[in-house]
Amino acid sequence: MVLAKNYVHLGIKRALQGDRTTANRARSKRASVPDRLQNNIYQYIATLSIGTPGQATDAALDTGSSDLWVFTNQTNFKDSFNPQSSSSYNLLNNDFSIQYVSGSASGSWVTDTVDYGDDKVSSFQFATVSSPTTQGETAGVFGIGQITQESSAEYGSTYPNFPVSLKNESKIQSVAYSLYLDSISAQNGSSVTFGAVDTAKYKGELYSVPFTSDVSFNVDFEVLGNKSNGVLDSGTSLTYLEQSVVDQIAQQYGATFDSEQQTYLIQSKSDLASTDPLVYTIGGAKIEVPVSELFIEDSSDGTLALSILPSSMAQDVILLGDSFLRSAYVVYNLQGKVAGIAQANWSPGSPNFVPITGDTIPGSVN
């Protein structure tokens, strides 16, 4: 992680579930994923240094939740956190609990130092979990959403989560960050930048779009003439739309629903009915999602699976997950309750960071 004046830049690594015994917590939390896709989709991992001395600890970056929680060494997982080895660790209580679709996490609220390279946040509140609660999960969660979505909010209590803490300690000027998930073929390059926009990471105009919820990052959008509203959620690997819209998309590309696999399939690339990108309109932005992101190829047989599923598999919530977000550059201004959206630039030059200083997004147009 790199600290510079008025912003904090954190590289995040893409982890293929098949390469590590970790189930994307957000898949379990908000949506179900057919077994066929489980070993061919990704999550995005941030490595934080927690405690004194610092311990490298993994957590999945998630704009769809707001708490940081990590596994302790009692799980015997690699890159977990040992509270007893930290001189700055402080136990608050044992009341942490969060519920997922297929599992839950519970443990302790604590405070400790979180180091991100050249600087740190002291006495930062987060949670520790000592036993896995969702099958296969070995990474915690780095939730960076609104504090109104913290697990403690349902009990009438909130606290400064990571973006708010950075603002409170004057590391950034606005509770805001920008998210860049590189293409599915890129091994490195994904990042989150707190407090700034990187103009090298997008193409064309950056459009300002209001969030339509005080809790989650909902935006109005349109795809194939269908108007909808969904959550910009980095913690969900796939995208979940209304059944009729998914059927329309599948028909356009020649995919058919396999009831046994619970997935829309095409037998090979040569069977694609169209190679045109799928276009989402969000405000003034037109985000083109190429076929390479729309379909997940099974390396064992070359079959293509549509990376969009019905929202009935996500508790009827519309989710614009990673299979959409890789094609978009998204700025989340939490205090201004506004997003900045543009087409992602997968071949960026040198970074050009512009600090976010208030409730708006620098360089954006309406």
Image (cartoon, rainbow, N blue to C red):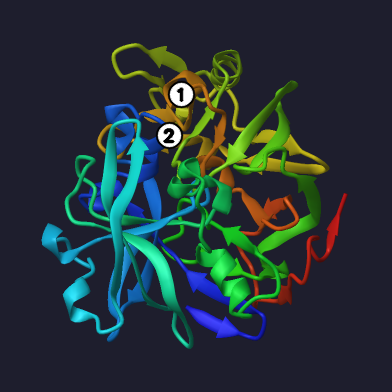
Estimate the x, y position of residue 15 in percent, counting from the top left. 34, 55
Evaluate whether residue 76 shows in this view: no
Please give left or right for residue 241 compared with residue 108 in the image.
right
Location of residue 79 by image quarter? bottom left
Badge 2: few (under 14), some or many (20 or more) residues near its Cα, within 10 Å?
Answer: many
Location of residue 296 by image quarter? top left
Please give left or right for residue 232 compared with residue 303 in the image.
right
| Residue at 39% from the left image edge and 50% from the top image edge | 43
Q: Which dot marks residue 315? A: 1
Q: Which dot marks residue 52? A: none
Spatial CA distance of label 1 from label 2 is: 7 Å
Of pointers 1 and 2, the one earlier in the residue sequence: 2
Compared to 183, does 217 lie above or below? above
> Disc 1 residue type?
Gln
Nearest the viewer among 90 and 127 is 90
Q: Are marks 1 and 2 in contact (CB under 8 Å)?
A: yes
Q: Which dot marks residue 30? A: 2
Evaluate whether residue 246 shows in this view: yes
Estimate the x, y position of residue 162 in percent, counting from the top left. 51, 66
Estimate the x, y position of residue 299 in percent, counting from the top left. 30, 40
Please give left or right for residue 132 compared with residue 295 in the image.
left
Nearest the viewer among 20 and 49 is 49
| Residue at 17% from the left image edge and 76% from the top image edge | 84
Location of residue 109 by image quarter? bottom left
Please give left or right for residue 223 compared with residue 124 in the image.
right
